[in-house]
Amino acid sequence: MEVTMIKYFIFLLFFVFNAIIFGDEKVEPFGSKEAIRGGVITIHTSEFPKSFNYYINNALDASIVFSLVYESLLEMHPVTLEFMPLLAKRWEISKDKRVFTFEIDERAKWADGKPVTAYDVLFTYDTIMNPSNLTSVQRIFLSRFERPVVINERKIQFKAKSIHYNNFITLAGLSILPEHFFKGKNFNRDFNLKLPPGSGPYRMTDVKEGRYYVLERRKDYWGDLLLHHTGMYNFDKIKFKVIRDDNVAFEAFKKGDFDVFTGISAKRWVTETNTEHFRNNWIIRKKIYNYKPEGFSGIVLNTRRTLFKDKRVRKALFMLLDREELIKKIMYNEYSPLTSYWPSLYKGGKANEPVKYDPEGAKKLLLEAGYDRLDSEGYLVNKKGERLEFKIYYSSEALERQLTYYVESCKKAGVKVNLELLSWATLLKKLENYDFDALTIGWSATLFDDPEQLWHSKHVNEPGGNNLPGYSNAEVDRLIDSLPPVFDLNERIKIIKKIDKIIYDDVPYILFWGANYQRIFYKPIFGMPKTYLSKYGDIYEFLVYWWIDPEKLEKYKKAIREKKPLPPEEVEVYYDVLEKK
């Protein structure tokens, strides 16, 4: 399961004037007015989270659960990107873009009926900023503000230390914690296995460590009063069932144990969808094209280790990965080689020059780097007799074939690469302390990411940080430091592209491959918005906007019982086409 960055979005109006912005509940909802509430949805997850507390575990699985239990001050319309009221019904931005005032909706309630107050917002800030808590990633963003001032029970004011284009978005997206549930507890330890009730639409009701966890929709959810929540949060229960082995999980899905299946490999998509389940449309497969920003994935090289300090070594190791061959032979041409850390910025245009498979060129670079002789086993060593050897940790068995190919390619060039499969929880422990040579990881993207947390040198040695390769480049630091006052989106993109070019040339990652679509399997029992997902939404939006259609459910049950086919559906769907219908 890939790591996910904190979700920050483009704010299209950059506070040119002093503005009091009132919450407008007349915004057209994205959720369908035809949505029906009820039922249980069961989905597969490959790992039990090391913690459900997203503030100390910024992984995808924790993010999904956390976002359904707790709420932010504001939310953003998934199509228009307009800010809409959530916990805060009213907000104000000063003319100098440094002071932000939020007024909490008097209707907002915690699950126990107590009101959400400005003191809960202050408590959340203090908790994240507490250096004893493992919240270093979130602390990067909140450290840009002075400690907020509570004006009264329902109003709080933040003052930024300096102007930053993301300041308002940071505060708007801050998930608020209930002080009376969290206060006096160990934030790093006491909320790992079960989250206290929040103000959101769901609460955790059943957790069996290592096996499953369940969210149950709150019948008294205060947010049901908001017009723009029409057609959202429709499932009575969401059950996440843990099966580590992906093949076992897929067989369980075909037997009906899961309603939805994600994390689909190219091999499975192409070669394992000719069974009766797919031929009879008892399982629907869908490839969805929308405007979700692409992230990146690859092998991160820990430059804190002496071996990877030399860029020539890193570049050579990249040149030993035959991505085009792997995409063709193993991944059925479902992907394209990544040539950027921000692929969505190029909108189909050219990013950076692809690093081609070139074993001879790699050998020359390694020779220049001092690996000029072979040991008795045929591996390269330097003048000190140090072998060119390292270990790659990985947590997804789906990558095993690709990595095995890479190991063999490196061996032919005289490089010894060892592989070790770890559980996600164990891998995260390695990440927290940078205790690795190399490992595979994927980063999701948002509409416009703040590059500081991943790439600024001041975060190189920060425990639990996101600068995994220990990347440090003075020019990149300078460019990142130049971004905060740049409110013009096009100008920021120009700067990000400069950053991208430098980082790409420095090779902190051996980049993998990417795609501009999302894949999903599901039973034909759901109703959903006509575009399946929102304009920028990721695949897990089905938890928010889909619902169980009783009529479709009965037809599905009958088809299974009588072993008869259901009507076929389009496999590939495009947001723009569907939106116009």
Image (cartoon, rainbow, N blue to C red):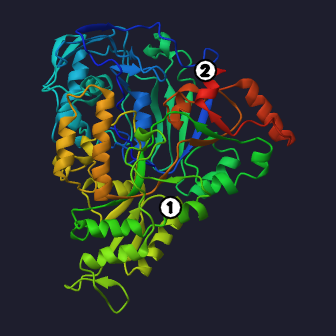
- Local packing at callout 2 (Cα closer than 10 Å; few below 14, some 14-19, many 20+) is some
Q: Amino acid at mark 1?
A: Leu
Tag 1 secondary structure: helix
Q: Earlier in the sequence, mark 2 or mark 1?
A: 2
Residue 96 coordinates in the image, percent (x, y): 16, 16
Distance, label 2 to label 1, CA atoms, is 38 Å
Q: Is residue 177 visible?
A: no
Q: Amino acid at mark 2?
A: Arg
Residue 480 coordinates in the image, percent (x, y): 21, 40
Horizontal side of residue 481 vs 445, given as left or right: left
Q: Residue at x 25, y 43 (%)?
A: 453
Tag 2 secondary structure: loop
Q: Residue at x 39, y 51 (%)?
A: 352
Residue 544 coordinates in the image, percent (x, y): 52, 27
Residue under pointer 1: 399
Placement of the C terminus among the 4 image quadrants: top right
Residue under pointer 2: 37
